[in-house]
Amino acid sequence: MITIHHLGVSQSERIVWLMEELGLPYRLQWYDRKPNKAAPDDYLALHPTAAAPVIEDDGRVLTESAVIAEYLCHRYADGKLTVGPAQANYTDYLYWMHFNNNAMGLRFTKSALAAGASGPVADTMREIVNRREESYYRFLENRLGETPFLAGQEFTCADIMVVFRLTTGVLFGARAIDDLPNTLAYVQRIQARPAYQKAMAIAGPAALAR
Ligand SMILES: N[C@@H](CCC(=O)N[C@@H](CS)C(=O)NCC(=O)O)C(=O)O
């Protein structure tokens, strides 16, 4: 049985959602964040880089959402929710699978700069980070004006990778999406999915309030 080591509340909600979409069984192990919101020591002991999510499967300990998603879909679901190299939308799929980590790096830099760095290097970083973050979100907004899901007509792991930063991630300082109508409509489409609703009740922000 696959164990999802879930840091509450965090990007590991993705893997709960993925397992619900695939209809696969799993065991959820919940870890509370420390008061400063970082992962607790027992979470860090799971893997040398222990960023949530971490899963355990048959003695293998895996981290990185995109790695875990591809692994689970190929190992246990015949590649469902993934797109292969022979398919026309393969490059779209790849791009959106990587979008979150790229945008997340910008967000961390932005937070560090907002904490008070000054001087010419900080000013340049501010200019680049702000411009780049806006381009990422405009690109996302345009894409969602063209296709219902990020890789194209079908829902895939690329959607599972991106949605956190548009929903739960906003509670942690990710850019709000109120000014992006296509993105807002997309989030509503996602929120109507039964697997998403179930996963959020188990592992999303609402689960903390229980
Ligand atoms: N690139 C990783 C990012 C994972 C990540 O940053 N996880 C955060 C939770 S949202 C985390 O573990 N934060 C707590 C900490 O590092 O102490 C992925 O996509 O899985």
Image (spheres, helix red, strand yellow):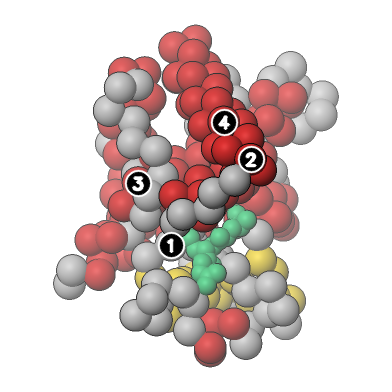
Q: What is the distance, in whole Å, between disc 2 and disc 1 at their CAs?
A: 34 Å
Location of mark 2 (residue): 120
Point out the tag, 4 or 1, that comes first from the N-terminus.
1
Decide if residue 198 is on the left or right side of residue 96: left
Q: Nearer the viewer, residue 90 or 45?
A: 45
Q: Splitting the image into four quadrants, where does ligand 1 fall?
A: bottom right
From what the image shows, is residue 21 above or below residue 201? above
Location of mark 1 (residue): 10
- The residue drawn where x is 25% and y is 70% is 208
- The residue drawn where x is 48% and y is 84% is 40
- Mark 1 sits near ligand 1, with its Cβ under 8 Å away: yes
Location of mark 3 (residue): 170
Callout 2: helix, strand or loop? Answer: helix
- Mark 3 sits near ligand 1, with its Cβ under 8 Å away: no
Q: What is the distance, in whole Å, between disc 3 and disc 4 at their CAs?
A: 22 Å
Point out the tag, 3 or 4, that comes first from the N-terminus.
4
Decide if residue 24 is on the left or right side of residue 186: right
